[in-house]
């Protein structure tokens, strides 16, 4: 499964790159799943992506999420609008919040799966480097613990990763943000927020690595890093 960034109007170089990833990911796949919210008006970005799906000739499933937030007439209007935009293989209304429709969605996706050679070992859960996965686990905790606007302006870098003879891992992680005010929020009063983020991340990293981890977290300011091609390369967002 290839999970792409969400479609949005770019406001910086990082946003441009994320939209590019979405558009390019439609090529060379066995099927496409487009997840939308229950809004009957189709936006410009969605129209562009639908056209990309159309030209790819890949079978496409439309997933309308958050159906628990609308009444049936509103949902029917959404289905009608998207039905006119593309001949979908299936339109599946779901609620990820309460699980409605997920069984039907899994069945549809299973039908799209094309048998092929095994490209990875059974015990390999991702083709991402371990350090990158650990950085993403820290960033996940930023998303869970902080106001929604702040995490989108943060990047996470593993600056130290070493293993002792007894298997314990020493790891230093630096969280970068764009403003001094955001740095203060991430650290929190007397360091409480940063401690919470680090503790939650450490627990997940230990489960992932299968060993004890000593994790130290730091916060630094890099203004406008999302508009810097060099910083985007440094943080692994792009190789361009």
Image: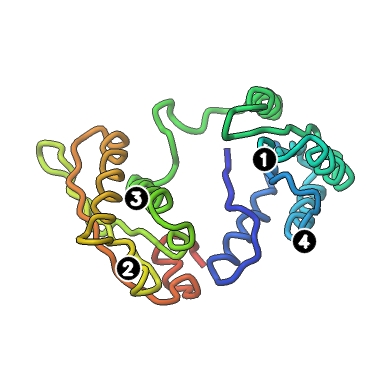
Q: Nearer the viewer, residue 216 or 171?
A: 216
- The residue tagged 4 is 44
Q: Is residue 21 left or right of residue 180?
A: right
User: Around disc 4, counting alpha carbons within 10 Å, would you say few (fewer than 14), some (14 to 19), or many (20 or more)?
Assistant: few
Task: Identify the residue at horizontal 79%, vertical 34% (top origin).
Answer: 72
User: Around disc 1, counting alpha carbons within 10 Å, would you say few (fewer than 14), some (14 to 19), or many (20 or more)?
Assistant: few
The structure's colour scheme is rainbow
Q: Nearer the viewer, residue 152 or 67?
A: 67
Helix, strand or loop at mark 4: helix
Helix, strand or loop at mark 1: helix
Helix, strand or loop at mark 2: helix
Is tag 3's residue or tag 2's residue first in the polypeptide sequence?
3
- The residue tagged 3 is 138
- How far separated are the C-alphas under marks 3 and 4? 33 Å
Is tag 3's residue or tag 4's residue first in the polypeptide sequence?
4
- The residue tagged 2 is 183
- The residue tagged 1 is 69
Task: Identify the residue at horizontal 57%, vertical 64% (top origin).
Answer: 17
């Amino acid at each position: 499964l290839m999970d792409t960034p969400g479609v949005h109007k770019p406001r910086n170089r990082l946003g441009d790159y994320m939209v590019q990833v979405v558009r390019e990911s439609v090529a060379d796949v066995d099927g496409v799943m487009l997840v939308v919210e229950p809004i009957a008006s189709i936006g410009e970005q969605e129209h562009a992506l639908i056209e990309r799906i159309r030209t790819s000739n890949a079978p496409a499933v439309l997933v309308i999420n958050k159906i628990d937030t609308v009444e049936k007439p509103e949902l029917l209007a959404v289905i009608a609008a998207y039905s006119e935009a593309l001949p979908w293989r299936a339109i599946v209304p779901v609620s990820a919040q309460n699980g409605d429709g997920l069984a039907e969605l899994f069945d549809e996706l299973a039908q799209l799966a094309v048998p092929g050679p095994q490209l990875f070992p059974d015990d390999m859960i991702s083709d991402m480097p371990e350090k990158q996965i650990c950085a993403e686990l820290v960033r996940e905790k930023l998303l869970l613990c902080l106001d929604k606007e702040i995490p989108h302006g943060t990047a996470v870098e593993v600056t130290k990763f070493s293993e002792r003879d007894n298997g314990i891992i020493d790891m230093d992680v630096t969280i970068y943000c764009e403003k001094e005010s955001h740095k203060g929020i991430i650290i929190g009063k007397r360091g409480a927020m940063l401690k919470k983020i680090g503790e939650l991340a450490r627990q997940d990293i230990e489960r992932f690595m299968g060993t004890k981890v000593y994790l130290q977290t730091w916060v630094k300011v890099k203004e406008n890093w999302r508009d810097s091609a060099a910083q985007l390369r440094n943080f692994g967002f792009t190789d361009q």
